[in-house]
Image: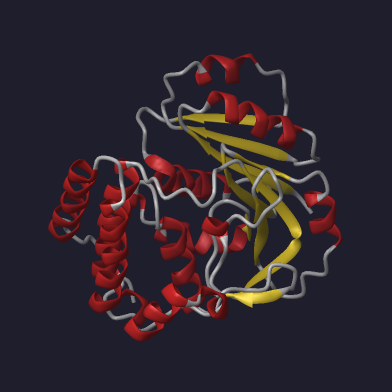
Amino acid sequence: MKCAALIVTYNRLNKLQLCLRATFALKFDTIIVIDNASTDGTEQWLSSLKESRLQILRMKNNIGGAGGFKYGAQYIASLDIDWIFFFDDDAYPAENLLDNFIQFKKDNYQIFCCRVLTPDYKICSMNIPFKKIPSTLLATIHYKINPKQFLPQSDAICEVQTFSFVGTIIHKNILKKYAHIIIDDLFIYFDDLAFSYYLSQKNNKILYVPDFIFVHDVILHSQIFSNKKLYYLVRNLIITHKIYRNKPFFTLPSTLCRIMTCFLLCVIQKNRVQSLRYLFNGIKDGFNYKVKNILF
C-alpha cells in the first residue's frame, strides 16, 4: 500500500514549515507540494530541502486551493500510488495517522474523511463533513438553528456525504475517474464541498473515521471574516448553484439563505461598508459567471 501527501501552499512559509516537519516524520511514499507561485521565500526554502520523497510542482501563478488540488490530483493519479492524503499548508497529520490508516479495515471504501482538530485539540468546525446534507430551504434553516442533526458525532465512525480538502484520503482510482470534476474556477472556498457532493451523488461512499486525525492551525469562533473570504464564499455559492442547479442543496432559495447569513456577518464587521461592497461584488460576479458545464 503506497500513500502520498498532497499539499497546496501559497505565501504561508512559517505554516508550511510546520506542516512539512510533521509530514516528513511519517512514512509517506511520496510528498507532493503544489506551490501557487509563492513570493515569500517558499520557493527558495523548498528547493533547499534534502528530502528524496518530496516533489515540488510550482505554478506560474496563483491558481488557488481549488486549482492546486485539481492539478495535484490529476498529476498524482498517474503515479504508482494507492492513496492520496489531501491537506492545506496550515494543517498537518497526527503522529499516528498513517499507522492508523494502514491498519484500518477499509472494506470497499475508497474515500475517507478525517477528524480535524485545532492546535488545542478542539473540533475544527470548518472541516466537519455533512452526515446529512441540508437539501431543502427548510432543512437549511434547521441547520442554521441546530447543526448537530446534520453532522456526525465527532468520536463515531459513520458514512458522510461531504468532505473538506483538509484531511481527506482518496484512492487513486477515484481521482483517475473524477479529478477533472474539481471546479478550479472557484479558486478558494466551497470547492471541496462541491466535489465531495458530486462524488456522493455518483454513489461513492465516504467514511468518517475519528481515529484519522489532522490538526488545522486556525482560529475558531472568530466573527471577523476577511473581505476576500466574503467575496469568494458568496460568489462560489452562486456559481455552484448555477452548475448544480437541479440538485436540492444548490437550489436558489437555499443559496440565498446562505448568502443572507453572509450578509448578517457583514453587518458586524469593523468596516461594514467595505465588507458589503465585497459581498455585493461577489453576488454580481457569481451571477455573471459563464457556466462551462452543468453537472448532472
Image height check: is 124 above or below 203?
Answer: above
Residue 162 percent location from the top left of the image? 52, 68
Horizontal relation, residue 228 to residue 49: left or right:
left
Is residue 294 something one can see in this rendering? no
* Residue 107 in the image, given as x and y percentages of width and height: 77, 75
Which quadrant of the view contains residue 245?
A: bottom left
Quarter of the image where one finds residue 33: top right
Q: How is the image coloured?
A: secondary structure
Q: Assign the N terminus to one quadrant of the image.
A: bottom right
- Identify the residue at image location x=26%, y=66%: 260
Measuring from the top left, give residue 262's x and y in whole percent: 30, 59
Q: Is residue 251 left or right of residue 117?
A: left
Where is residue 166 shown, x and y percent of the image? 57, 51
Placement of the C terminus among the 4 image quadrants: bottom left
Q: Relative to residue 59, is residue 132 depicted above or below?
A: below
At x 50% / y 77%, what residue is drawn? 146
Q: Is residue 189 visible?
A: yes
Q: Residue at x 41, y 26 (%)?
A: 37
Looking at the rendered structure, the number of numbered marks drawn on it comes to: 0
Determine the residue positioned at 86% across, 60% down. Answer: 103
Instruction: Out of 277 and 231, give the one closest to the viewer.
Output: 277
In the image shown, does 187 or 69 lie closer to the viewer?
Answer: 187
Viewer-nearest residue: 140 or 161: 140
Task: Please state if 66 lies on the left or on the right of 243 as rendered.
Answer: right
